[in-house]
Image (tube, rainbow, N blue to C red):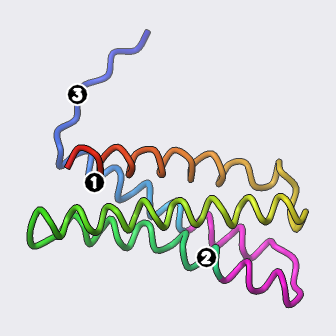
Amino acid sequence: MVKREKMDNKQFAAELETRTLKFGVSIIRLSARSPGGPESTVIRHQMTKSGTSIGANYREANRARSRADFRNKIKICESESSETKYWLEIIIGTELLSREEVMKEYNECSELLAIFTSIGKNS
């Protein structure tokens, strides 16, 4: 069993900023791998917007002017995570990409949604 050091809030925030940035890059790459066509173009655009918005809004939350501003931006992160998960489910459901091709991003998105839901409830 590996012992983990307890992170302080600044360390956690920095690691989550990095994680959401990597997720945004991963979403852009997934979008680039998706097939063309008018329907998939709309889906890719929506997924890319919401998937990259998570990290942008989290970065802004860490620079919030007030506690209320922080909570509001965290709620946006939660909402954008939920929306991104929806678009990933649409991609799987319409078979634009296989479940296997999407699972890495889907699992990470699910974890980010859980994190932002927890932060929102505790802030």
Where residue 34 appears, as percent x and y from the top left, is 81, 73
Q: Position of residue 100 (x, y in %)?
A: 83, 48
Left or right: where does residue 103 sit relative to residue 59? right
Residue at 55%, 69% in the rendered image: 51
Q: Which mark is residue 14?
A: 1
Residue located beneath label 3 in the image: 6
Marks 2, 3: nearer the viewer: 2
Q: Which three-letter amino acid code belongs to the residue tagged 2? A: Thr
First in sequence: mark 2 or mark 3? Answer: 3
**Front position in the image: 1 or 115:** 115
| x, y percent for residue 72 | 26, 68
The secondary element bearing badge 1 is classed as helix
Mark 3 Cα shell of 10 Å, populated few (<14), some (14-19), many (≥20): few
Reply yes or no: does residue 78 show up in magenta.
no
Quadrant of the rendered structure where residue 77 is?
bottom left
Marks counted in the figure total 3
Q: Which residues are magenta?
A: 25-45
Looking at marks 1 and 2 on the same chain, the residue that comes earlier in the sequence is marked by 1
Sequence-wise, the earlier of marks 3 and 1 is: 3
Amino acid identity at mark 3: Lys
Looking at the image, residue 35 sits to the left or right of residue 108; the answer is: right
Of the numbered discs in the image, which one, if any, rests on residue 86? none
Indicate the quadrant where residue 17 lies: bottom left
Residue at 82% over, 58% down: 92
Q: CA distance from mark 3 to mark 1?
A: 14 Å
| Residue that protrudes farthest toward the top in the picture | 1
- Secondary structure beneath disc 2? helix
Residue holding disc 2: 48
Front one among 23 and 77? 77
Q: Residue furthest left?
A: 66
Q: Residue at x 64, y 73 (%)?
A: 47
Badges 3 and 1: C-beta atoms under 8 Å apart? no
